[in-house]
Image (cartoon, rainbow, N blue to C red):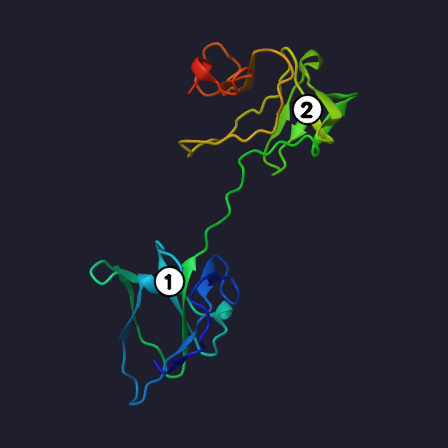
């Protein structure tokens, strides 16, 4: 190893690296003084990385333009030395850098908004399109359609439910998820118990939804798991 460019090793960057990876900014240049030495083992300690990773790879490139580099070399983790090791034949004067697999930002399975994708019959909502474009929450019965109320909450539009009004999504694909989180921006105006979500249309027997208590902001003994 002849030198490095003194780039940062305190964080990952997605600059000049193939899609799906984040790399250390630091680049190292390899030099062979006595001809081709064949395979060498290069190691980097876990403590030298910004954070522990499940997979570390090494990119090799002739001109340090790693975005067009060859297939990454996957390292092997040595539990004894707590370091990643790479066996590779690196040509003379080539550059290397280390990279991890970039973590994808999780996308909501369903994202329903009162300010986008709303289809109305008068002021009644009969379709509410998922913001991600995957699903449509529907209600074909006019009597059961909720209302769109402009400036309903903090100057923002809301979909207002009352009584037996509801919107349903058919064939919601929750597999292979074992657990899901539901985030709501809502306000209960009246009543002591309000159904927020149910995984079937039978709210009396279903396991898969939960109730919200307007009195203590919890579902208490009324929860369905």
Q: Nearer the viewer, residue 23 or 221?
A: 221
**Any part of residue 73 in sight:** no
- Mark 2 vs 1: CB contact within 8 A: no
Quarter containing the N terminus: bottom left
Looking at the rendered structure, the secondary structure element under dot 2 is strand
In the drawing, does residue 7 fall left or right of residue 84?
Answer: right
Residue 131, picture quadrant: top right
Q: Residue at x 49, y 65 (%)?
A: 17
From the viewer's perspective, is 18 left or right of 165? Answer: left
Q: Write down the quadrant of residue 39 in the picture.
A: bottom left
Residue 4 screen position, x and y as percent: 41, 78
**Number of the label disc, if any, that sits on residue 49:** 1
Q: 78 or 205: which is nearer to us?
A: 78
Residue identified by numbered label 2: 159
Which of these two is toward me, 158 or 145? 158
- Which residue is pictured at 51% across the width and 12% down the height? 203
Tell me: 34 left or right of 147: left
- Residue under the image location 62 percent in, 37 percent down: 133
Q: In the rendered image of this protein, does residue 89 appear above or below residue 181?
A: below
């Amino acid at each position: 190893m002849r030198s490095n460019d003194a780039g940062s090793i305190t964080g990952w960057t997605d600059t000049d690296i193939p899609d799906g990876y984040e790399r250390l900014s630091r680049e190292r240049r390899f030099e062979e003084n006595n001809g081709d030495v064949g395979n060498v083992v290069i190691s980097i300690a876990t403590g030298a990385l910004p954070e522990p990773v499940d997979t570390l790879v090494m990119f090799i490139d002739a001109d340090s333009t790693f975005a067009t580099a060859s297939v990454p070399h996957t390292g092997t983790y040595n539990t004894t030395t707590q370091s990643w090791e790479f066996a590779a034949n690196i040509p003379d004067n080539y550059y290397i850098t280390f990279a991890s697999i970039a973590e994808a930002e999780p996308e909501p399975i369903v994202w329903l908004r009162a300010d986008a994708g709303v289809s109305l019959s008068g002021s009644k909502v009969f379709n509410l399109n998922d913001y991600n474009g995957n699903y449509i929450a529907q209600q074909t019965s006019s009597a059961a359609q909720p209302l769109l109320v402009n400036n309903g909450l903090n100057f923002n539009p809301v979909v207002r439910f009352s009584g037996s009004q509801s919107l349903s999504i058919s064939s919601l694909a929750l597999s292979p998820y074992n657990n899901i989180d539901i985030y709501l921006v809502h306000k209960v105006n009246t009543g002591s118990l309000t159904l927020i979500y149910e995984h079937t249309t039978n709210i009396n027997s279903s396991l898969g939804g939960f109730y919200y208590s307007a009195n203590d902001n919890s579902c208490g003994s009324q929860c369905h798991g």
